[in-house]
Image (cartoon, rainbow, N blue to C red):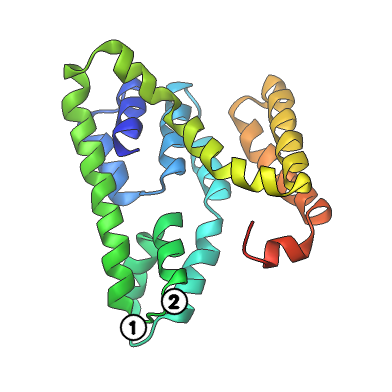
Amino acid sequence: MGIGYAAIAIKAGMSPLETVAMSVFVYAGAGQFIAASMVLSSASIMAIVLTNFVVNLRYFVMSTCVLNQVEDSNLPLNILAAHTTVDESFAMFSLSQDSSIWVYLGIAIIAWLSWIFGAAIGVVVLDLLPVIVTNSFNISLYALFVAILVPAVKENRQVAALVVITAVLNIILSQFLGNWALIVSTLVGAAVGMYIVDDEYVLSGDA
């Protein structure tokens, strides 16, 4: 995924240093893909920042849950833990019985470094790979979202309906709002989801 992000970032006109630096200082997985894609489509800085803010709001919740679980921590470690929190590190730590901040940081920093190295490898090898291979990296973001959505969609019709509603809304709004459509459709989809998705399903941990 790090190499796939690098492919989109370089195509969007970002320098190798900017590409790797985003992985170091932003580190938001799908958010980095979205930012690079929006740079490619000449979106404004404000649109890119707000879109990432909305898409990555879940990290507020994840970081809070992690910091409530760990023991013997302090502010500098909390800041580092929050910065390196992503879906994978959060899921692994949540399923473990350990409450050590060092165990969490071990999990999270390894994932962070792997993404940074992936981006660094990407900016080096992309020029050496056939065009058909580098172009295939452009669909990696969509593959990521499909992998995340399909299990939930198969298990719950309400979630499936919500995905369709949000997708259709984004397609329609993109004709009028451009890059701002993703922000609006995400917020509206979240509001609709509060009413059509059962609380029991969300609280069960399957969502």
Q: Quadrant of residue 205?
A: bottom right
Residue in view at x 46 percent, y 42 percent:
31
Q: What amino acid type is highlighted by mark number 2?
A: Leu
Label 2 and label 1: CA atoms lie apart by 8 Å
Judging depth in this view, the residue of 13 and 198 nearest the camera is 198
Residue in view at x 36 percent, y 25 percent:
137
Residue 107 placement (x, y as % from top left): 30, 64
Q: What amino acid type is highlighted by mark number 1?
A: Ser
Q: Quadrant of the C terminus?
A: bottom right
Rate crowding at label 2 as few (under 14), some (14 to 19) or many (20 or more) other CA atoms within 10 Å. some
Quick check: can you spot residue 45? Answer: no
SS for callout 1: loop
Q: Is residue 177 above or below residue 89?
A: above
Direction from residue 53 to residue 83 in the image, left or right: left
Residue 156 placement (x, y as % from top left): 73, 49
Q: Quadrant of the N terminus?
A: top left
Label 2 with label 1: CB-CB less than 8 Å: yes
Rate crowding at label 1 as few (under 14), some (14 to 19) or many (20 or more) other CA atoms within 10 Å. few
Looking at this rendering, what residue extends furthest in the top direction? Answer: 131
Residue 7 placement (x, y as % from top left): 31, 26
Q: How many discs appear?
A: 2
Looking at this rendering, what residue extends furthest in the right direction? Answer: 195
SS for callout 2: helix
Q: Is residue 197 above or below residue 161?
A: below
Residue in view at x 47 percent, y 22 percent:
42
Q: Which residue is mark 1?
A: 73
Q: Is residue 183 above or below residue 173?
A: below
Looking at this rendering, what residue extends furthest in the bottom direction? Answer: 72
Q: Which residue is mark 2?
A: 67
Quick check: can you spot residue 170? Answer: yes
Residue in view at x 50 percent, y 72 percent:
64
